Amino acid sequence: MGLEMRGITLKPSISLNSLLLNPNSLYGSTRIGLKRTPLLVVASVSSSSSASIITHDQSLSLGHSTRPDFPILHQEVNGRKLVYLDNAATSQKPLAVLKALQSYYEEYNSNVHRGMHYLSAKATDGYELARKKIAAFINAKESTEIIFTRNATEAINLVAYSWGLSNLKAGDEIILTVAEHHSAIVPWQLVAQKTGAVLKFVSLTDEVPDAMQLLELLSRKTKLVVVHHVSNVLASTLPIVDIVRSAHSVGAKVLVDACQSVPHMVVDVQSLDADFLVASSHKMCGPTGVGFLYGKEELLAGMPPFLGGGEMIADVYLDHSTYADPPSRFEAGTPAIGEAIGFGAAIDYLSGIGMQIIHDYEVELADYLYGKLASVPKVRIYGPKPTQTVRRAALCSFNVENIHPTDIATFLDQQHGVAIRSGHHCAQPLHRHLGTNASARASLYFYNTKEDVDLFIEALDDTIAFFSSFTRR
C-alpha cells in the first residue's frame, strides 16, 4: 500500500502503536527541498513478507524526502529542535523497521529452526530471508557466507578465536593500522598473547593511514591484515582492493571492518575479494543487538566453532560432539530473531533508495560539512581535506582551541538540541598519534540535510563564544 510523504509536524502524545498503524498521523503539509533526487523506497517486509513501496517526493533532497520516515527526528530536545549528528555511533530507525519488529513480536514470535508449527516456520523463513538479503546487499556468493552475530565486535572476535587461534603461531605477523577501532585491535592482542603472533601497525601520512607503508610491511610472515574500510575518526577510505591483492600475493588473509562503509556506499565483497568482512545493523537503520560476519565459504568450512550449545551441532554424545555446517556452526543458541528480521527490513529500505544514491548525496553533505566547519575560527578538523580525488565520509572529528570536546558536546546538547559525539571514539591509539586525548565528532546520514549542518555551525559558534568569554576575563 502506498504511503504519501509530505512535510512533517510533530504531534504530542502519539503512541508508537498508533504511529505504526497510521504513519500519516505524523505528517503535515509542506516541505522545502534543496536538490532533486529520484527515489523509490522499499519499506519493511510485512508479516506476509511482501514489501510495501513508498514513493518519496522527487522534488526534495534525499534528506528532506526521507526524514518523515524517521519519527525520532521530529522532536524537541532541551527546548530546541533535535539535530541528530551522531550517526557514526548509531543510526536512527525508519518506520519500516519499527513495523517489522512489531509485526514479528505481535504475529509470529517463535524460535527458529526447531519447531514444526506455523509460527516457528514463519519465524525461520523471516530469519533466513534476512540472511539472504544481507548476502545480496554485499554481493556474497552464497547466503551461507553470512553469519549473524550480536554486532561487528563479536564478528571480529569470532574470526580471532576461531580462525586466529587455529591458524596463527609464534612469529606470524598481523598487520593493522593505528586508526583501527578498539574492537579490531583488542581481540588480536589477546590472540597474539596466546599464540606468540606479532602485531605490526601502519602509521599515518597526512592524517591518513599510510597505504604504501602497509604494502611494504607485507611479507611471507604476514598471515592476516586487519583494516577498516572507512575511518570513524579521519573520514578517510582505504584502497581495500589493492590491499587485498597485495596481501593475497604473500598468502595472507584480510579482514575488513566495514562498519562505516556498508551503511553509506556500495560494498561488493566479491569485487573487494576480502576474506572476512564485518558490519553492524544499528549503523545502517536496523535494530541494535545484531550484526554479521561475511566469510568466504571455504574459510568458514574449515573453522571450528566459536561458542558451543544448541543449534551449532550435528550430533551430541557424552564424550564428543560433531558440528553443523556454517552458518549454523557459528550461531549457538537462540539468535536475535526479531532483530535479524528488522535488519532485513533495513536492508529493504536502503536498497529501495539505492546505495549509490545515498553515497552521492552524502559526498555532497560531507563537502558541505567540512567547508562550513573549516570556516569556524580555531577549529582543527582531523583527516584529509576533500578534493576532486579525495572524498571524505560524511563526518568530521574536530577540536576547538582551548575548549574540551566534552564541554562542546554538552553545551550543544543542552543549549541547542544538537547531538554530536565527544571522546576517543574507541580509537585511543589514533588520538594519541594525533596528539590529543579526545575529539568532538559530527557525523551525518542520508536523512540529514544542509539545514542540519547550518544549525550545527550556528550552535557551535555560540558554544565557542560562550566558552571564549571566560578566557577573555
Image: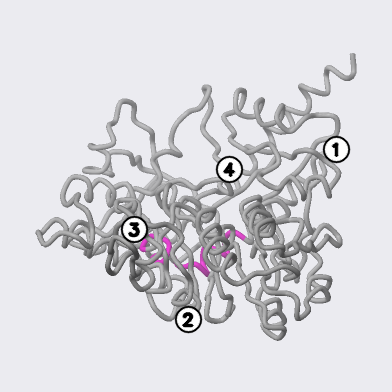
Distance (Cα) linking label 2 and label 1 = 52 Å
Distance (Cα) linking label 3 and label 1 = 43 Å
For label 1, the residue is 378
Q: Nearer the viewer, residue 29 or 211?
A: 211
* Mark 3 residue type: Ala
Distance (Cα) linking label 4 and label 2 = 38 Å
**Element assignment for label 1:** loop
Distance (Cα) linking label 4 and label 3 = 22 Å
For label 2, the residue is 298
Q: Nearer the viewer, residue 318 or 217?
A: 318
Label 4: few (<14), some or many (≥20) within 10 Å? Answer: many
Question: What's drawn in magenta, residue-wise?
Answer: 348-362
**Nearest to N terminus: mark 4 or mark 3:** 4
For label 3, the residue is 345
**Element assignment for label 2:** helix
Q: Nearer the viewer, residue 63 or 444?
A: 444
